[in-house]
Amino acid sequence: MTSMDKAGMAMAIAITAIFLGIAATMGATQDAGPTVSAPTVTKTVEPEMEEKVKPLKSGYERATSDTDPGVGHETHQLAVLLAPSDKVYSGTLIYDASENIQLVTLRGPIGADEKPAKTWTPDGDTIFELTFVDPKNAKGEWAFSGNALAVHTMKTTEFTVDYKILDLTETEAMIVEEETVELSEEIVMEETIPAMEEPAGPTTHTVDIPTGTSVPGCEESNACYLPADITINAGDTVEWINVDTAAHTVTGGSPADGPSGIFDSSLVMADAVYAFTFNDSGNYDYFCMVHPWMVGSISVN
Ligand SMILES: [Cu+2]
């Protein structure tokens, strides 16, 4: 039992006692009949057991996280709720986790010519488009669509999530021309489900600072920031997540010309996040002051 439940129960008992007290008083003043004494309310205090595992509510399933198999996500935890499939799932996820979680869907594998804002790969070759929503809560619901569904934390410690999936549909992935139609239909469907979604206005884009970037090598595949080059709209925010164990910076400018002064994270420690909102359109190069081979760019429409 949570302390919340206990508080609620104590309050219910207190209210009942007050009510019975009033009833007894009224009975006494109205007909001066026999005094009704309120029954003694006894509450059995349950022994304080450390309930580490809460009971699973009916209709829910429980999943436990494991190390995120994604490249560059080794310090994260992931619980896969719907395993990657060639079918497109959609539905509403109801979740109740042991800590704040992020919500993830994958779409793919995608073609090499596609350049989505955020990707996830188990092996460096098979690339999925990643949709990553951080509602900053442990409990809620999410209307999702994708080839896989998972929940995630940026921690190394295991979490559990109780969940159920409402209105789950599975549709065959179609050839590319038809898939466009398929996806737009799903978007319409999602809009009819009131749920926590990324708002239609300015959005937040996530860029990882991957592990191992403190030694040269990532620049060969333009992977020192992931993705290194993204296009956003004016007013959007970019969040850089340092997935690496080393500290890095996100500094506007270039190693050749030095800092532009437009934005500078200063040192972003392991697992820390730096965010900057780009209000003006233009091209913004940036680099890491500590590791000058690390470069990226933000193109703001
Ligand atoms: Cu760096």
Image (spheres, grey):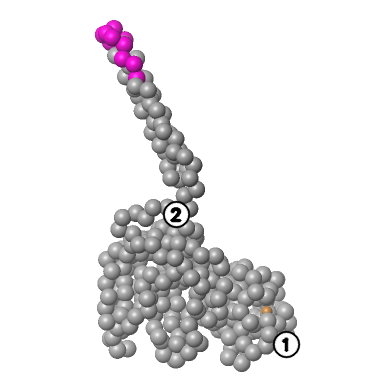
Identified at 61% across, 92% down, the residue is 220
Q: Locate ligand 1 by image quadrant.
A: bottom right
Work out whether residue 215 or residue 253 is closer to the camera in this orientation and state it.
215
Residue underneath mark 1: 256
Using residue 52 as the reference point, say whether residue 297 is left or right of it. right
Identified at 47% across, 40% down, the residue is 47
Q: Quadrant of the N terminus?
A: top left
Q: Which picture quadrant has residue 12?
A: top left
Q: Position of residue 18 (x, y in %)?
A: 38, 24
**As drawn, 28 above or below 131:** above
Q: Earlier in the sequence, mark 1 or mark 2?
A: 2
User: Is the distance from the Cβ of mark 1 to the nearest ligand 1 atom less than 8 Å?
Assistant: no
Q: Is residue 283 visible?
A: no
Q: Secondary structure at mark 1?
A: loop
Q: Label 1 to label 2, Cα distance in Å? A: 55 Å
Q: Residues within 10 Å of mark 2 (few under 14, many from 20)?
A: few
Q: Which picture quadrant has residue 8?
A: top left
Using residue 234 as the reference point, say whether residue 188 is left or right of it. left
Q: Amino acid at mark 1?
A: Ala
Q: Position of residue 204 (x, y in %)?
A: 51, 70
Q: Residues within 10 Å of mark 1 (few under 14, many from 20)?
A: few
Work out whether residue 245 or residue 231 is closer to the camera in this orientation and state it.
245
Which region shows up in magenta? Answer: 29-38
Q: Position of residue 37 (x, y in %)?
A: 34, 16
Q: Position of residue 117 (x, y in %)?
A: 48, 79
Task: Considering the whole magenta stretch, tell me its main secondary structure.
Answer: loop
Is residue 30 part of the magenta span, yes or no? yes
Identified at 43% across, 82% down, the residue is 128
Which numbered dot is residue 53?
Answer: 2
Identified at 51% across, 65% down, the residue is 158
**As drawn, 292 above or below 90:** below
Is residue 116 part of the magenta span, yes or no? no
